Amino acid sequence: MGMLDSKVAVVTGAGRGLGREEIIDLAAHGARVVINEVNRPDAKAAAHETAELITNAGGEAIVVLGDCADSNDAEALMATTLDTYGDLNIMVNNAGFLRDKTIFGMSDDEFDSVVRVHLRGHFVNMRNATQHWRNRAKSGEQTYGRLLSTSSEAVLYGSAGQPNYAAAKAGIIAMTLGAAQLMGRYGVTCNTIMPRAETDMTNSGPTAAMFAAPESGFHHFDPANVAPLVSYLASPDAAHISGEVFVVWGNQVNVLQRPTVLPAHVNPDGEQKWTPQGLHASLSSHFDANYRSVYDGFALPIDQG
Ligand SMILES: NC(=O)c1ccc[n+]([C@@H]2O[C@H](COP(=O)([O-])OP(=O)(O)OC[C@H]3O[C@@H](n4cnc5c(N)ncnc54)[C@H](O)[C@@H]3O)[C@@H](O)[C@H]2O)c1
């Protein structure tokens, strides 16, 4: 018995990289899977290769090509999933690409295309999956729903060379949290991962050396290391975990702490609006000489912590 036997899982961008490892792991735990990839010859070939790896290992897999951010393609993805397997239980939004530039050098298209593929790509598939689960629950049918979103530590570190990507990945967390609030009543969980892995996205340019496999020993950035968390969050054992954000790579998982709202500064002059001078006097107790600005990120990389 696999922990995901009888479950149906969709992973977007599952031909390569993290998506491929995630869908292989979901299938290895018994899920019947749907591999979504963009309709391009190389991606199509990669998607069919992933399907073959799964079916050769005794699993069930189909390929549905289409743009994860296109409403019609996303509807077709949902319809083919339901026609083939009769249900959808696990929706993993993973697909995306980068167009890195600084804020002052970025074109409209570089901004729009990255926000579209990540944020809208999550939105359209989240909408379809949550509609499906809500409709089932409302008509009294048994509902098993697990929504997984893919964000990035770019949100935490500012990521000055990726204003489009960091913004989209931050939006994904907010959207997933809202979905978690809405869908809790139907027993559906919605969580977000921030993975790190050596993939086509990271194996060239400035990140290549950091992500490269070592000559020997454990490859911390093997994308397969991320997959078990996805399968776990998709499983019945994780029914009580929702709205959370996880950093995941290698042999470690970090649970993100909630952002903290510190005690309020209240105008000492009573119930009236602040003056800039009053704010300066009050906030100086926080932003004193020892204060470390967040300009270098909300979280520090582990080696600088
Ligand atoms: N690799 C990392 O270290 C890392 C870090 C943080 C977040 N992520 C996120 O993980 C996810 C997977 O990235 P990866 O590293 O595996 O990259 P990847 O480039 O190896 O895989 C992305 C896949 O998405 C597919 N894709 C692109 N546009 C698509 C579209 N419109 N519709 C359907 N499929 C599409 C690509 O063809 C590709 O197969 C992305 O959301 C990425 O932002 C990765």
Image (cartoon, rainbow, N blue to C red):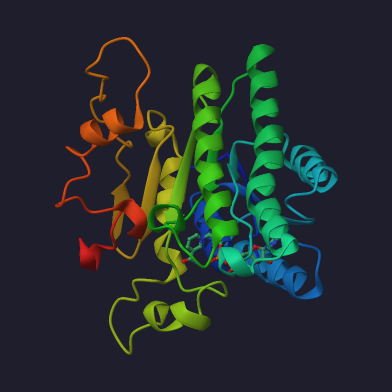
**Residue 120 in view, yes or no:** yes
**Residue 53 in view, yes or no:** no
| In this picture, residue 269 sits left or right of residue 44 | left
Q: Quadrant of the C terminus?
A: bottom left
Q: Residue furthest bottom?
A: 215
Q: Residue at x 42, y 57 (%)?
A: 153
Ligand 1: which quarter? Answer: bottom right
| In this picture, residue 7 sits left or right of residue 39 | left
Q: Residue at x 46, y 67 (%)?
A: 223
Residue 234, image x, y percentages: 48, 41
Residue 186, image x, y percentages: 54, 19
Say which quarter of the image contains residue 226.
bottom left
| In this picture, residue 13 sits left or right of residue 165 | right
Say which quarter of the image contains residue 106.
bottom right
Residue 110, image x, y percentages: 69, 64
Q: Residue at x 67, y 40 (%)?
A: 123
State whether residue 152 is above or below residue 198. above
State whether residue 248 is above or below residue 287. below
The residue nearer to you, when weighing 249 against 161, is 161
Q: Residue at x 45, y 77 (%)?
A: 207
Q: Quadrant of the N terminus?
A: top left
State whether residue 262 is above or below residue 71. above
Q: Residue furthest left?
A: 290
The residue nearer to you, when weighing 67 against 204, is 204
Residue 59, image x, y percentages: 60, 56
The residue nearer to you, when weighing 222 against 259, is 259
